[in-house]
Every structure is written in structure tokens, then in C-alpha cells.
Image: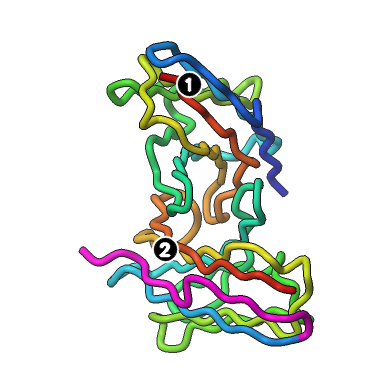
Amino acid sequence: GENVEQHPSTLSVQEGDSAVIKCTYSDSASNYFPWYKQELGKRPQLIIDIRSNVGEKKDQRIAVTLNKTAKHFSLHITETQPEDSAVYFCAASKGNTPLVFGKGTRLSVIA
Amino acid sequence: EAGVAQSPRYKIIEKRQSVAFWCNPISGHATLYWYQQILGQGPKLLIQFQNNGVVDDSQLPKDRFSAERLKGVDSTLKIQPAKLEDSAVYLCASSLVSSGGTGELFFGEGSRLTVL
């Protein structure tokens, strides 16, 4: 089955700097790659997703890139703010299969 | 629009006891998932329902875990008997798409289980 690796496990950045989180997946047939944000004690919430027919997607300060050949995708957050501090999870799925999540990255934005 | 409701939010039990969690998905969402999230890890799928049928329960420890979704709406997840390693947050999620993982999952607040 699908296996998703995520790194780094923790990331600290200064406010205003950029943050990048990377994930790799094992199943070349996977075609849907969402990113979820989980604030402390809260539920995971979708922040952005990408499908395999595009290479990049942006939404204000966040963007996701996908390299199907290398089987990896990345989350980019620009101009980080303290409210970006959270745990971020990548995930992958194909067709009718459920999402498989990475282990998460704890992002700390230092003011 | 009401979100995914879960209860109880917190539960503390001793090992070998039993526990049940309840989930009410967003109205109209055909697909319901139970995920287990151990501290410091990502959510791990336990079971997926589409309406009242099981789509995927390959990672459900069936010797101690059971789940049902009668009438295709609410769902309950039961653990009997509980082990120390079952300590985790149990997340229920629902999605609008009729099957699979290619649509947004809406998660509940989770039920935090501590097994002593």
C-alpha cells in the first residue's frame, strides 16, 4: 500500500521568512495530495490540495508543488506569521482509496 | 453548516475495560472514516464506511476494535478490551464524495482516550 514520508519533523522559522515542508510517496498511481493544518488541540483542517494533473497550485501565502516523476510534493509558506504555527500533515490517495497521512511537521514561527 | 460531532471528548479507562465513541457526520456526507492519531504521529485509518457499508477495514484490529454505521448516518467505534497502546485521539471524519479519498475530509474534534 501507499507510504508517505514527511520531513522535517520540526521546523522553526523567523516571522516573515519562508517555510518548506517536503513529502514523498511510494505509489505512482496516487493522484490526490492534500495538506492539513492542525493547531494545538484542534481538528485537522484542509489548507490546500493538488491533483496529479497539475504541477503547482497557489492560494495567497501558501503553495504546493508536485513532482510526479520523483514522487514528491512540497508545501511552501511565504511571509510566515505566528498564526501559521501548527502541525502540518501531507497525505496521498488514489482513486477510491482513503488518505494516507505523513507523520507531520511541527512548524514554529518565532516573532 | 454543523460540523462533525464526536463524543465523548475525553475518556480515561483502565486496561482491559471497554469504551465506545460516537460520531455524527455532516449531513449528506456519504463517506465516514475513523482515524487513530497517536501522539506525535499522523492520523492512521481504522475503517471507512460508504453509507452503511464497510469499504476498508484492513487496518482495524478486529480482535478488539469494532465499528458500525447503522442507517448510514451516525457511527460508533468500540474497543474491548482496551490495551495501553490504544491511548490516542480517535478522529472521525466525513466527506461528500461517494467513495475514496479524493475529496476534502471534515474532521471532528476527536475523542482522546487514555488507557491506564
- Residue A37: give its label: none
Q: Magenta includes B62? A: no
**What chain does badge 2 belong to?**
B
Looking at the image, which residue is at 56% across and 66% down? B112
* Left-right relation of A59 to B15: left
Q: Which residue type carries mark 2? A: Gly
Secondary structure, mark 1, is strand
Among all residues in the image, which is located at the extreme left?
Answer: B1
Which quarter of the rendering shows the N terminus of chain B? bottom left
Among all residues in the image, which is located at the extreme front?
Answer: A111
Quadrant of res A4: top right
Q: Which residues are magenta?
A: B1-16
Q: Nearer the viewer, mark 2 or mark 1?
A: 2
Classify mark 2: residues with Cα within 10 Å, few (<14), some (14-19) or many (20+): many
Q: Which residue is mark 1?
A: A65
Distance from disc 2 to disc 1, alpha carbons, whole Å, reads: 28 Å
Nearer to us in this view, A95 or A76? A76
Looking at the image, which residue is at 41% across and 19% down? A111
- Residue B108: give its label: 2
Residue B77 rendering spot, x and y as whole percentages: 57, 79
Nearer to us in this view, A5 or A28? A5
Secondary structure, mark 2, is loop
Looking at the image, which residue is at 66% across and 56% down? B38
* Left-right relation of B88 to B51: right
Q: Is residue B22 above or below residue A54?
A: below
